[in-house]
Amino acid sequence: MFLQIDNLLAAAEVQSVTELARRTRFINGRASNPRNTTQNNLIQDPTDPVGQRASQIVLGAIQRSEEARNFLWPNRIAVPQFLRYGQGMTYGAHVDAALMNLAAQPLRSDVSCTVFLSDPAGYEGGELVIHLGTETVRIKGGAGSAVFYPSTTLHEVAPVAAGERLVMITFIESQLPDAAQRELLYTLNEVRALEGLNMQWHNRMSLESVIANLLRMWVR
């Protein structure tokens, strides 16, 4: 299951982050994954203080989003980082690493996130391509939008034919490692939010009980 949020970042935040990107130091993307020969992009230098300011803006937007929290059940969120793709750049089909080095304890990547920063009309190609068996989903979000998807998913970034693609990515360790369990609870919470006030009290309390007991069984 994917979650797309159209306006994760407010317009002013998009402007601030893109302005910070112009002053951020970038390095060869292969530094983050030297063994992946299909990676051809630029990544934010993690030691650059300007980029770190932008990262905190995006991290704050994810943390304050109730919709994202209900989908992710986040335990920890990796610091977001810029990725830049110029003409001809791409990132071939891959699955994100299961464990990310984060402080003293590795972060388990349960959910991956791409936050789009460029105007989609300003570049050609560069879609996030997610493979689902024999089918593919191509996503090219508007500036400030975000997509969350299971980190186990095979995905790639299509070659940029013209212009520049600027995004931020991050990874989330969920309190619910199982994607099917996250989806069930997200659906139940949506039903509660949309229909809860219309239910008879007994039925609403039965739904609340199911949600609470599933959390007791599944949260890690």
Image (tube, grey):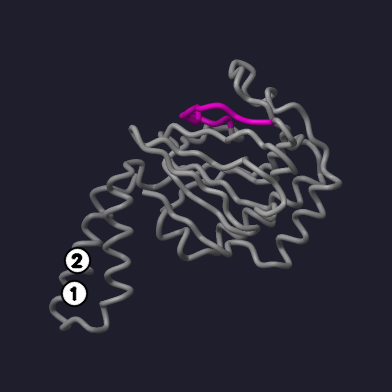
Q: Which residue is mark 1?
A: 205
Tell me residue 148's x, y (percent). 48, 49
Instruction: Name the residue located 64 percent from the left edge and 18 percent from the top edge.
Output: 34
Local packing at callout 2 (Cα closer than 10 Å; few below 14, some 14-19, many 20+) is few
Mark 1 → mark 2, Cα distance in angstroms:
6 Å
**Over which residues does the magenta segment extend?**
89-101
Q: Secondary structure at mark 2?
A: helix
Circles 1, 2 touching at the beta carbon (< 8 Å): yes
Tell me residue 156's x, y (percent). 53, 33
Q: Establish if 215 lies above or below 177.
A: below
Comparing 136 with 188, the one in front is 136
The residue positioned farthest toward the right in the image shown: 23
User: Can you say which quadrant of the picture contains the C terminus?
Assistant: top left
Q: Secondary structure at mark 1?
A: helix
Q: Is residue 92 magenta?
A: yes
Left or right, 197 with respect to 175, comes to left
Q: Establish if 197 lies above or below 33.
A: below
- The dot on residue 194 is none
Instruction: Name the residue located 23 percent from the left edge and 69 percent from the top edge.
Output: 208
Comparing 70 with 117, the one in front is 117
Local packing at callout 1 (Cα closer than 10 Å; few below 14, some 14-19, many 20+) is few
Tell me residue 185's x, y (percent). 29, 57
Q: Which residue is mark 2?
A: 209
- Residue type for callout 1: Met
Left or right, 106 with respect to 71, comes to right
